[in-house]
Structure formats: C-alpha cells, structure tokens
Image (cartoon, rainbow, N blue to C red):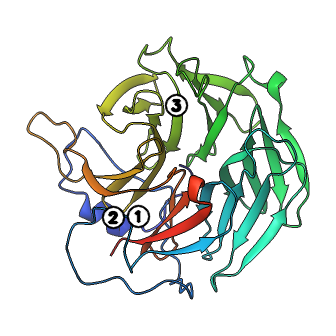
Amino acid sequence: MKKHLSKSIFAVEQAMTCLIAKFGALKISKFCSVGIVSIFLLQSCSDSNEELTNIESDEIQSIEGIKMPESAFTMRDGRIIVSEIGEFGKNGDGKILQIATDGSVKVIADSGLNDPKGILVEGSTIYVTDNDEVKKVSFSGKVTKWLGPSDFPRKPKFLNDITIDMNTMIYISDSGDIKNGGGGAIYRVDSNGKVSILVDQVNDPRILSPNGLTTFQRGYLTFNDFANGFLFRVRLRDLEVEKLSEGFGGSDGLVYSGINLYISDWKNGKLWKIDISKVNEDGSLSDPELLKEGFMGIADMDVTSDGKYLVIPEMKANRILFLPLM
C-alpha cells in the first residue's frame, strides 16, 4: 500500500509530535512531496469543509475506460502507474498503464500478464503481483517472472498488495481464499530474493485474508484484512501483531498521507479516514471517519505526488477517480 521511501518526512514528523509513544517515530513510504502535479482533468479543491457523503461531486474527476483497474502507484515525478486486470480470471489480457501529468494514458505492457494487482516501482522496474506470481515489468514493456509459486514457502493462492520498507525488504500479501476468507499470509522478501512467511493465522488467528499494506511507520507493517475488515500492524522486530481498528468491511486499499490513514472498503463502496495524530485516552486510535461512499469496487489507492488528490481505482466502474484531499 505500498511504497515510496521517506518523503516530506520533516514536515510530517513535526506535525506528529503530539502523537503518544504508542506510535513512535514515523516514516512515510507512500506520500510524495516532489513537485506540483497539474493533471489537466483535475479541478482545484473547493474551500468548502462540508462532509462528503457520496461520490457525485463536481470536484471528483476521472479517467474512464480502464477495464477493472486494481492498483495505482504514484511516482515522484507525478506519473501514475496502474494495473488493469481486464476480464477477471482470463489469462493474458492484463495490462500495466501509465497516466502522465497531462492526463494522457499510455500502455506500458499488454502481454504476459493475467490479473495484475498490487504495484511497486523501484528504480526502473515495476513489480506487480499476478495471481500466484510476482512479475517484473520494464518501462519498455518487457515482462518477466520474478517470483513463482515454488519460490514461496507454500503455494500462494491470491497474491494481492506489495510494498517495501526503508531497509529494502519487500512485503507481499496473499489474501488466500478471497471469497470465503482464510488461508492468507503476508510474505517478506529479502535483498537476495528469499521469501519467508512474515505473519499468518499462526501468529494471530484473526489474520484471514490480508490485503492492503503500508510501511509508513518505522519498524511496523500496517495491513488490513479483506475478510473481517480489521486493521492490524505487526512489529517487525518480533512479529507481534496488534489490532488497531475494525469495521472496514472488505478492506482493500491502504495509504498514508499527512496525518491521515485512508482505507478503502471494496465490498461496500466506502472510503474511510483515520487521523492518527488523535488518540483515545486508552492510547487506541481515534474512531474512523466515513469520508465518502457509493463507490463501485474501490481498490488499491495512492496519493498524487503533490499530496492534493487521492488516486482511486474503481474496479467495477472501469475508471480511475481523483478525490481532492485539500
């Protein structure tokens, strides 16, 4: 969920000084601060503070005609990389797309992909989960297998999100039995490409179908669960799992920006926000705020490189939405 290493760190850490020791020092992994992106189809954010309750809004703009977009990844230069599943379950029709800062869409790769989902861009390589494999895609369109089923400790069932931490450890979620819930795991890939199980039901029986991932907090991996709608974090040094919140339905996308954690509910079409600078008296996270609803399959999100818009793949509507954050 996820993905870039420490950007806009100092400004955010200054804003986070009120956060109690429960969350410790924070590092941001998905929020870019380089440059200002002006996508031609985006309108300026309104000064209104009225609460958004449905997706019908003049402020929300979209790019249409992308067949089942699953994941969006924003690069530092403002380009957005998108995975297009195509027809779910059909081999060979998946694509990797690039949305430029002028709003134009380019196909990077249109062969060698089945149902591409989570995206991670490192250097000149796009890593993308694809059913039970992880593939590498070059910006020239070459697709190669990076990890196959035999590279995992057990055969993965539904590889989903992918992210990286500041130690260049890569994390991959396997949602397991995505229809019924259960059998999922989170895998860790070291710098030598060795895959190990980070956490699964052995660590915590509440872990059923891990989905969105983010390493915004130093020393922790935060993730949500598609089956039960729980939000967890795992402390990486000892693999202690903690449930942070719940009630997110079929939770999917997970992205951090500013002082807010955004969580998408794929099943129920809802977008949630948690202000992590606010905590309850017992040290727990503040209650989630329903930011918007009425989506059709809201999936793996990111934030534009200027921090102004949430980039939302709306799978069932075949489009990418841009939701103002400021």
Q: Which residue is more in the foreground, 282 or 45?
A: 45
Q: Earlier in the sequence, mark 2 or mark 3?
A: 2
The residue located at (65%, 74%) in the rendering is 79
Q: Is residue 36 above or below residue 123?
A: below
140 relative to 284 in the view: left or right: right
The residue that disc 2 covers is: 12
Q: In what element is the residue under mark 1?
A: helix
Residue 274 location (% of width, % of height): 28, 51
First in sequence, mark 1 or 3: give its number: 1
Neighbor class of circle 3 (other Cα within 10 Å; few <14, some 14-19, many 20+) is: many
Q: Dot 2 lies on which element?
A: helix
Quadrant where the C terminus lies? bottom left
Q: How many marks?
A: 3
Q: Mark 2 or mark 3: which is in front?
A: 3
* Residue designated by label 1: 9
Mark 3 lies on a secondary structure that is strand
Image quadrant assignment for residue 259: bottom left
Q: Is residue 54 left or right of residue 119?
A: left
Measuring 62% from the left and 76% from the top, which residue is drawn there? Answer: 77
Label 2 amino acid?
Val
Quick check: can you spot residue 95? Answer: yes
- Residue 195 in the image: state x and y as whole percent: 71, 27
The residue that disc 3 covers is: 210
Q: What amino acid is at disc 3?
A: Pro
Tell me the CA gap for discs 2 and 1: 5 Å
Q: Nearer the viewer, mark 1 or mark 3?
A: 3
Q: Amino acid at mark 1?
A: Ile
Q: Nearer the viewer, residue 54 or 191?
A: 54
